[in-house]
Amino acid sequence: MSSATAAKTAAAEAVVSLISDGMMLGLGTGSTTALALEALGARIRSEGLSVAGVPTSFAAERLARQHGIPLTTLDAAERLHLAMDGADEVDDAFRLIKGRGAAHTREKIVAAQADRFVVLVDPSKMVDTLGTRMPLPVEVVPMAAGPVERVLQRLGAKPELRMGEKKDGPVVTDQGFWVIDAHFDAITDPAAVNRTLNDTPGVLDHGLFLGLATDVLIGQADGSVAHRTV
Ligand code: 5RP
């Protein structure tokens, strides 16, 4: 197992140990959450744990079914006790960039409904300044791609329409929209970028998660976990 996978596994197992009987959960998307869903499925089988989860993507939904995790919806579950998800970047103020898997819109909806939003990372995801290592994904209505790219340029980013692999043309999200990856040198004022994008017609949502994470579990290659809370 690579050291990154060992660290992700440690964070994944740590979040599953926070889950108790009767909880309504948010089920994130990505390789780290996939490990948590596997571990949660194992607890459901071995302990008869009774939980249900709202998936944040088609990918999470398929994995949850595979691991025998009962599914629910935000209509049925008034409040989620705990949502778990990975991240692409996390800063010291628990601000995140998410969306490498283009699932950030549903991930943000689900995280916002949770009493606890637990972020699972390996140490490589911790950054001093957001936007220094990963682009900021922005989900757009296709006809708004040009105007949104111009807004991103004015914010100082280089926009790049995300293209499919094993599919010609743009990545199409679970909602049927496109993703523009905004390459910043650094996002020095995340709140201002957040406000501008939230106010831009044609932007469905973007990967800046501000004020949502309550816990960050930083898995280490030796299997230990640093648990930070707000
Ligand atoms: C998907 C995401 C993922 O949670 C994020 O990209 C982290 O993924 P991984 O756990 O594979 O590193 O935001 O949209």
Image: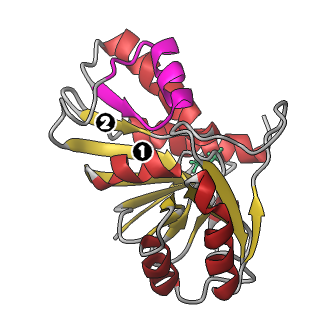
Is 71 situated left or right of 144 in this image?
Answer: left
Residue placed under numbered mark 2 in the picture: 25
Instruction: Tell me if residue 131 comes above or below residue 172 in the rendering.
Output: below
Residue at horizontal 50%, vertical 34%? Answer: 57
Label at residue 84: 1
Query: In the image shown, does 187 or 146 lie closer to the viewer?
Result: 146
The reply to whether residue 85 is in sight is yes
The quarter of the picture where residue 230 lies is bottom left
Mark 1 is on which residue type? Met
Discs 2, 1 touching: Cβ within 8 Å: yes
Residue 89, horizontal then vertical, whole percent: 61, 65
* Magenta span contains residue 69: yes
The reply to whether residue 135 is in sight is no
Whole-Å distance between the Cαs marked 2 and 1? 8 Å
Residue at horizontal 65%, vertical 40%? Answer: 172
Residue 13, horizontal then vertical, whole percent: 49, 36
Write down the region rendered in magenta.
Answer: 52-71
Residue density around tag 2, few if under 14, some if 14–19, many if 20 or more, within 10 Å: many
Q: Secondary structure at mark 1?
A: strand
